[in-house]
Image (cartoon, rainbow, N blue to C red):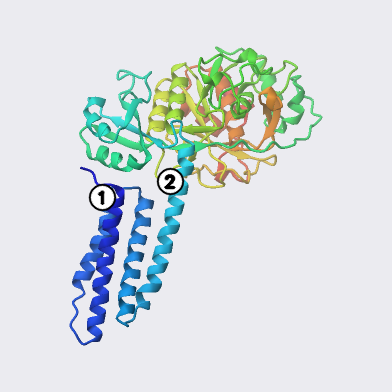
Amino acid sequence: MMMSNLVFHLIGVALATAAFLVFGIGIARKNKATGFNPLPAFILLLVAVVFQFVFPTSGFGERMAHLFLDLGLGMMIASIYLFQKQERYKMFYGPGLISALLGASLYGLVFFGQWMFQQETEEDALTLSILVELGPDDKIEEIQPILRKYDATYKKAFPNVDLDEDEDLAQYFLVYVDSFSRDLLMHDLRSDKENVDQLDINHHFTYKLPEAVEVEASRFNFRANDPLLQQQWYARSLDYNGVYDLIRQNKPQKKAKVAIVDTGVDEHHEDLKSTYEKSGTDGDYDLHSHGTHCAGLAGAVTNNGTGVGSLNWEGEFITLTGYPALDDYGRGTDQRVAKAIIDAAESGADVISMSLGGPSLFGPPKAQVDAIKYAHKKGAIVVVAAGNSNDDARRYSPANIPGVITVSAVDENLDKAVFSNTNTKLKRPIAAPGVNIMSSVPSDKGTYLAYNGTSMATPIVAGLVGMMRAYDPDMDAKTAYDLLHNYGKTVKDSDKVGRVIQPKQVLEAVIK
């Protein structure tokens, strides 16, 4: 029968107290010229420390808090004993108080973190989810005794993928468990090496929409008649006019599908609706606005006298579609992102644009890695944001997942944007404008706004890759990246963010 966490805590305190009491008694005896062997005290102290890490009663942070509290209480009890014996009690009292306060502070941080984490779950606030991957020959029934032990429930993580399509993704299950039992459950599942291939917490995260920025209009003579092109400085910097002259003389082989894996896309937006293809998911509307902004940059209908411009001349080159990796508040999970990638790939997307992500110090979530592998297998080219933390994108996913094209942001001077992560330690770095970027948003948000971020740079690249696929439907990710890089413009910060895309030169090379 499993002992409660409280019992374990009391045992830990008892072991630490016993260790320091033995020290205290020994010190008192030594001062009275009585012999003292410190070995039993050291053994008890070692047992007290090891105890916290042998029994999986909680997470690492909580165990460290327990340990500091145990040691602190033990030293303070020993100091009381020494005080009564009129011995050197201060040698334990001060360190004991500091250790106890440190443990209590760490407890507070741990519980606050758990509370914040629980507020973002899609289930009730006391339920957390775990991604469990079974072996290709294993069945969920084989781990049900473990799940029943902790009253855990489950469902298929990616029900639309079967074993014949992908033996990894088909074997993922989303397991729901009470937060207080999560670590115990994970310990038991990890011990079942015969059935469980991979085990990860299904991390939750929230994307906060950046503040809108003001953009001045220019007086440049664009070929297209979209009124807000005058507020899209990057359209001039990237020579959209040269692209328009080129593509009007060269018809595409097909319309490429660019999937926006994000908060969804407002399918009724005036500048998107004629080129939008319904996904049949929650991705066909957008109460947040991030996904709609990205969609406009990737493929807003151009030369229609409305709104913003993109490379998608009169909507003849790109079809847009949306898949919901994030909800209406910008909240997502590892599983939800992976499922959106899978859904986009199965819909036949030529390009998947992902302006999302977060820190992954210990490597990217395997479910997302497997989903992107699946997308590549289905023929999609995946373009992702480097991130906005002015850090190394190697520490962020999906930017650090093999096979993706990772996009950093540059400003009006084509210098690295101050917020942009660097990406040149990854395999496929590229850069695009990401400062003061005007695009579409849902009408209740203002219809058109300008934002900053690698989120904005990413769909600009994804839209260009979509144009490339429109002319060469069989182009693979490596070829696409090689073209972007080889014809990219070397700028002052290219050693940090890669070369800046040059759409006209790339498309000339593809059309030839």
Residue 344 placement (x, y as % from top left): 47, 21
Say if 230 sits above or below 416 in the image.
Answer: above
Q: Spatial distance from mark 2 to mark 1, Cα to Cα?
A: 26 Å
Residue 183, image x and y in percent? 32, 43
In front here: 352 or 159?
159
For the residue marked with disc 2, what is the amino acid?
Leu
Q: Quadrant of residue 187?
A: top left
Q: Quadrant of residue 249?
A: top right
Badge 1 crowding class, 10 Å Cα cut-off, few under 14, some 14 to 19, many 20 or more, is: few
Query: Which disc is residue 361 wearing?
Result: 2
Q: Residue at x 79, y 32 (%)?
A: 217
**Mark before the other along the chain sequence, 2 or 1:** 1
Disc 2 is placed on an element classified as loop
**As drawn, 30 above or below 408:** below
Q: Quadrant of the N terminus?
A: top left
x, y (%) of residue 34? 19, 84
* Element carrying mark 1: loop
- Residue topped by disc 1: 55
Disc 2 crowd, CA 10 A, few/some/many (<14, 14-19, 20+): few
Tag nearer the camera, 2 or 1: 1
**Where's the C terminus, which quadrant?**
top right
Q: Residue at x 36, y 77 (%)?
A: 91
